[in-house]
Image (tube, rainbow, N blue to C red):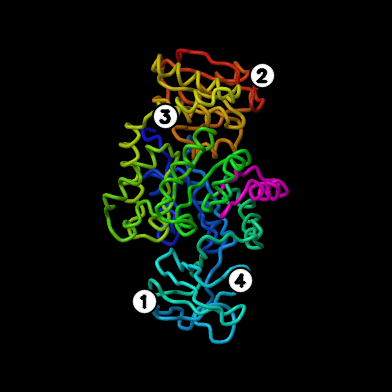
Amino acid sequence: MKRRTKIVCTLGPAVDSRDKIHALIEAGMNVARINCSHGDWDTRRRWIGWLRELSPDIAPVAILADLQGPKFRVGMLPGDTLELVNNSTVRVGSGEGVEIPIEQAEILRAMTPGGRLLLGDGEIELRVVVGVTPTVFEAKVVCGGTLRSRKGVTLVGKAFDVPALTPKDVIDAEEAVKAGVDFVALSYVKSAADARELRRLLERLGSRAGICAKIEMRQGIQDLDNILKVVDLVMVARGDMGLQMEIEDVPLMQKRIIQDCTLAGTPVITATQMLESMIHAPRPTRAEATDVANAILDGTDAVMLSGETASGSYPVECVRTMARIAEKAEGLYDRTKIEREYERHRDAVGHTDAIAHAVSDLAQILRPRAIVCTTTSGQTPRLVSKFRPRVPILCATASESTLHQMAVVWGVEAARIPSPASTDETIRDAIDEFFRRKRLKIGDEIIVTAGVPAGVPGNTNMILTQTVR
């Protein structure tokens, strides 16, 4: 694997065939995202079957089920659309005479004169003028356009005390577990308590799927340190983030989230509109190419395609383009950033983190063919990855869940080995597997990190250098 940054692709009608999904994998897809806001589980199970069938044995594709969350939406409009003209007035809410139906009581209770309503992805803006009744409001159209049924509604600057998991989310999580997904993403995470609620549900269902926290609200950013202690993966969800806060704050929040995730050794995905113009065009804009590159230079583990692959005209070309941009940008990554942060937080460094840092330092000096990590939980390769070594990170694990969850970690290629009887046997099996997969050859110098005794999570305590024989 020459490219180190991982690519997440959202599945949808544009790639609803075995051949198209195979083409995405061949083009460089590492993680397949299933958006539970659209479609049905019969279709999703078909996709998952194709993914498992077509996924390579080494560095297999992971599957992420993205729960819809408690999103507020416009109701059904007569004729399914409504034209909104600038400076006109319109009635919104629940009751007689409303032109834009909004049924959720939480958002209606929070509406006050002067409040800003963003519809869809923010392309339509209304300003609340007056309350006609407790549930009907008159609003002025600040920025008009064509509104469609079931589009999202955001009341800017307001947070709502709603459950982290809706009844639909619980059903989707149950189906996702039955289908064997590798990650479940939780939308609108406000606190670590939200993530723990999903964790409890997955544990009740007997699932070892990782939890992805979608950070898109100020409350989630404010509690990020605690959220990172609970989750396995973070997504910088810039779509709703751009509705929840001023647009000029989004790039700064992106950088802060990526930095905090990197320091914690938690993989992070940067998402939304990365190559948006390629939904309709065969080439991205210069700004989009720069956006992808800058996210990689910030330190993101993965970059995500949404509508570009789900419903666009050029899904496979999008993946190839993103792969080329990523590979070019990786060469300019400034590794001194994480070194400075590591030194600044040295007093809080844990045992495995220190081992990972030492491995990365040793790789910088010796320039081996690869770093070989044996792992049960995946913690060691995640921590090695955060220091962005210039050589491949080869991860050997006996855990099926860890094998797939490594698909989102920068620079890591994972392979399955038998359950270890001893540390020596684990290292031998790891080297043999990567030799068989042509990632190593006779005479290669490698750095190995492992644990004694073998198979104990969080027990990495050994570094050795070795020549493949």
Check if mark 4's residue and mark 2's residue have beta carbons within 8 Å. Answer: no
Amino acid tagged 3: Lys
Which one is closest to the eye, mark 1 or mark 3? 1
Mark 2 lies on a secondary structure that is loop
Going from N to C along the chain, the mark reached first, 4 or 1, is: 1
Residue 86's tag is: 1
| 216 sits to left or right of 165 | left
Mark 1 or mark 3, earlier in chain: 1
Q: Residue type at mark 4? A: Gln
Depicted 212 relative to depicted 129: above or below: above
| Disc on the earlier residue, 2 or 1 | 1
Give, as a three-letter code, the residue at label 2: Pro
Residue bearing the label numbered 3: 337
Boundaries of the magenta span? 187-213
**Which label sits on residue 104?**
4
Dividing the picture into quarters, in which one does residue 311 lie?
A: bottom left
> Distance of mark 4 from mark 3, alpha carbons?
45 Å
What residue is rendered at 36% in x and 60% in y? 312
Number of marks in picture = 4
The image position of residue 157, as x and y in percent, is: 52, 60
What whole-number distance in Å separates the C-alpha atoms at marks 2 and 3?
A: 34 Å
Density class for disc 1 (Cα within 10 Å; few <14, some 14-19, many ≥20) is some
* Residue 201 falls inside the magenta stretch: yes
Numbered label attached to residue 229 = none
User: Is 33 positioned to the left or the right of 422 in the image?
Assistant: left
Q: CA distance from mark 4 to mark 1?
A: 26 Å
Labels 4 and 2: the sequence-earlier one: 4
Q: Which mark is residue 453?
A: 2
